[in-house]
Image (cartoon, grey):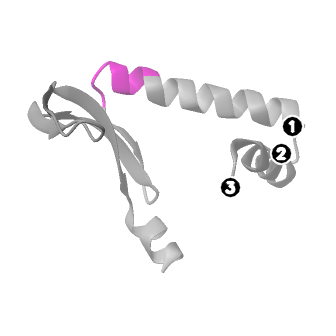
Amino acid sequence: MVKEKLIEMMASEANISKAQASRAMKALLNGITKSLKKGEKVTFVGFGSFDVTKRKARNGRNPQTGETIRIKAAKVPKFKPGKHLKDAVK
């Protein structure tokens, strides 16, 4: 599903306009992003949680040349699904 379809579904189920649903989606995503930037964990009970983890520096290979390169350490967002989401997808 793409973002536009999700916005249509939100508008239909919440009985609001697509513009309102789009603003709500933007606000939700901005809120999650800002919280993760601050290092905060974002949890939706039953659905799942977003967190930032640190990835260590490591060696990799350039696929075109086969040359060994150094990949820097980085912070990466992670999502862990909750029980209700896992059960719903089974």
Identified by mark 2, the residue type is: Ala
Front residue (pair 65, 41)? 65
- Residue 15 lies, in percent from the top left, at 88, 47
Q: Earlier in the sequence, mark 2 or mark 1?
A: 2
Mark closest to the chain's N terminus, 1 or 3: 3
Tag 3 residue: 1
Task: Tell me whether the residue at label 2 lies in contact with that at label 1, contact meaning CB atoms closer than 8 angstroms.
Answer: yes
**Helix, strand or loop at mark 2:** helix
Classed neighbour count for the residue bearing mark 3: other residues with Cα under 10 Å, few (<14), some (14–19), many (≥20):
few
Going by the numbered disc 3, the residue's amino acid type is Met
Question: SS at mark 1?
Answer: helix
Residue located at (16% from left, 24% from top)? 72
Q: Residues within 10 Å of mark 1 (few under 14, many from 20)?
A: some
Most foreground residue, 9 or 14: 9
Residue at image position (78%, 36%) is: 21
Quarter of image, res 59 = top left
Q: Secondary structure at mark 3?
A: loop
Amino acid type at circle 1 is: Lys
When the figure is inspected, residue 49 is found, relative to residue 25, above or below; the finding is: below
Looking at the rendered structure, the number of numbered marks drawn on it comes to 3
Please report contact status of discs 2 and 3: CB closer than 8 Å, yes or no: no
Give the residues drawn in magenta, as a range. Answer: 34-40
| Disc on res. 11 | 2
The residue labelled by disc 1 is: 18
Q: Quadrant of the N terminus?
A: bottom right
